[in-house]
Amino acid sequence: MASLPSFGHVHEVAYAYPDVLGLFKAAFGGILQVIEGKLEFATFYKDTDPLATAILFASTLGVITFTLAETVRNFSQVDRLWSILPAVYIFHYCYWARVNDIPSNRVDLAATSVAVWSIRLTYNYWRKDGYKWSTEDYRWEVIRQHISKPAFFLFDLTFISFYQNYLLLAITTPAYLFLIIAKNFPHDAAENAARIDTIFSRGMMLAVILEFFADQQQWSFHQAKLAYKSSGRVPAGWDKDDLERGFLCTGLWAFSRHPNFAGEQLFWVLLYQWSAFSTDSVYNWAGLGALFYLFLFQGSTWFTEKITAGKYKDYKIYKQHVSMFLPRIQAIKEGGFYFPGKEPKED
């Protein structure tokens, strides 16, 4: 069975890419021994590299979500796990550290930040009825309409079920590096942790706060829009033109077309940067998770906006004046974007 790797210098941690296939084989072989009764599960768990068991778990989930999606013809199985799995992986690292008597203060702090992130995102997904069995991301249906059944089958197998499951594991690998550092350099981790850990953990919490307010503004807008459509009366505090326009473009959304997505990406980039500082390196292999997470948001947001622009005629104007994620300097100077006739009145 694969155990946590050993290093002589902290720099080595940053550039020692894990043997993913080897780790999977080690964990798979170990769990087979558990099933056959040749090995106690507790012994298998304690003696196996936690990344190896995490890879095995993500692979198993890939099989389960793919099978379930193809059986019930609902392809949002991974979506329902999106806000939960990163917390599961990092708490797995925390528990493994305790079982092996490895100091885990930094991993615990990261787990706390991710737990807050998980609770917020899970709640937001729940109130949108995301956990109803019949609910499915509308984008999957759009894709189904534009490609053949065999092509969508491959898309589900490769991207929806397996790629996304592995990605949700990959974005948590900075915490795995924290674990390696704690095991190999316990004194170094203790001496250098305080200031770095405080800065990055608080930065991650600020990213969650940004997501919270952005999602709350969007939720309030859509609730007001529904109320207006059903009653014909404009709810207090809302503008009729804004509601009829169909999409939110005020508050944080006057500076960024997706401030919630900006906060989401910032959260995981900060976790990665935290690991880079901890390994005393400009970059490390755990950055691949954050990088591919950014790629995912670029592609999915482009696709979402293509659909949105087809529904709302003013969205193209909005896109011309407001950036996708990071606010433009000019927008900050001007106090955000306002449609003609909606500029804030000067005192």
Image: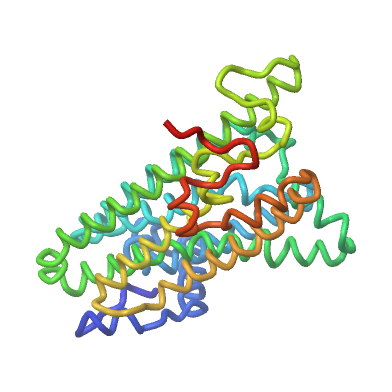
Q: How many marks?
A: 0
Point out residue 114 in the picture as x, y percentages from the top left corner: 38, 49
Horizontal side, residue 294 vs residue 282: left or right: right
Query: 284 or 157: nearer the eye?
Result: 284
Residue at image point 55% right, 64% down? 166
Query: 172 or 120: nearer the eye?
Result: 120
Chosen colour scheme: rainbow
Query: 56 or 260: nearer the eye?
Result: 260
- For the C terminus, the quadrant is top left
Residue at image point 59% right, 56% down? 61
Residue 341 seen anywhere in this rendered image of the structure: yes
Point out residue 208 in the picture as x, y percentages from the top left corner: 40, 46
Figure quadrant of residue 126: top right
- For the N terminus, the quadrant is bottom left
Residue 35 seen anywhere in this rendered image of the structure: no
Horizontal side, residue 323 vs residue 186: left or right: right
Point out residue 155 in the picture as x, y percentages from the top left corner: 75, 65
Residue at image point 39% right, 58% down? 40
